[in-house]
Amino acid sequence: MAELTLTTFLTLDGVMQAPGGPHEDTSGDFPHGGWLVPHADADMGLIVSEIFMKADAFLLGRTTYDIFSAYWPKVTDPYDPIASALNSLPKFVASRTKDTFSWNSTSHIRGIRKDLLELKDRFQREVQVHGSCGLAQTLIENDLIDEYRLFTFPVVLGTGKRLFGVGTVPATFKLVSSKTTGSGAVFSVYRRGATFKTGSFELE
């Protein structure tokens, strides 16, 4: 059975909206699209490429699918590991508003909670989620993510869609690994840890 992994780019204050360009996602009048670009470097590119090489399939939200499908089919370099994976491997889109997709090997998935286990059973390595903020909220709420791969950049925005938004269920995570890119981004891998607990430093 495959694992479900989530890879995303975050600011220090947890914003994941529109990291790659001003027009990626302007919902909520978001004015900071493209905030990641000045901090992208070869280290980040190498890590992302290695992640994509582990994929057997992709699960995407509608907005991320639209962004990817407008860009990656135009990248035809057979040695590009990201383009090769995205253009050839199965892609599943979670959408309430659209159920047909033109990008090669793309299918619609209707119910995440209902269909995800069957989807994972079809593959051996990883079903990968990239970005997909709305989808991520559903996956987090239902504790469906096996591994989080988070790039945190030295940027604070103060506004925008966050990975762990309102309604996130308290949870404890275990840090699996962490490394820093040349531009100062921190790449951290987390898995679910022990049961969430609280404590107190108060003197009795």
Image (cartoon, grey):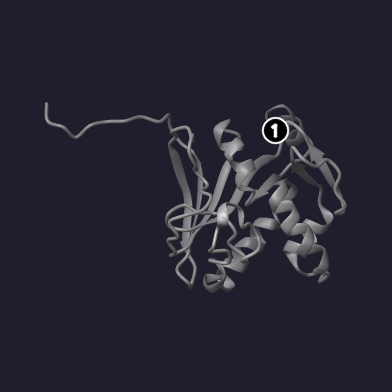
| Residue located farthest toward the front when viewing the structure as drawn | 29
Q: Residue at x 54, y 66 (%)?
A: 36
Q: Answer few, some or many: residues within 10 Å of disc 1's Cα (few below 14, many 20 plus, some between 14 and 19).
A: some
Q: Amino acid at mark 1?
A: Ile
Image spot of residue 158 (x, y percent): 43, 56
- Tell me the element at label 1: helix
Query: What residue does disc 1 label?
Result: 112
Q: How many marks?
A: 1
The location of residue 46, given as percent across then percent down, is: 62, 67
- The image shows residue 97, relative to residue 178, as above or below, that is above
Quarter of the figure that contains the N terminus: top right
x and y percentages locating residue 41 in the rendered image: 56, 73
Q: Nearer the viewer, residue 124 or 112?
A: 112
Q: Closest to the observer: 115 or 89? A: 115
The residue shown at (69%, 53%) is: 64
User: Could you tell me which residue is drawn at 74 percent across and 37 percent down?
Assistant: 96
What is the x, y in percent for residue 33? 57, 64
Q: Quadrant of the C terminus?
A: top left
* 26 w.r.t. 79: above or below: above
Q: Is residue 193 above or below residue 81?
A: above
- Residue at 72 percent of width and 27 percent of height: 114
> Toward the viewer: 139 or 160?
160
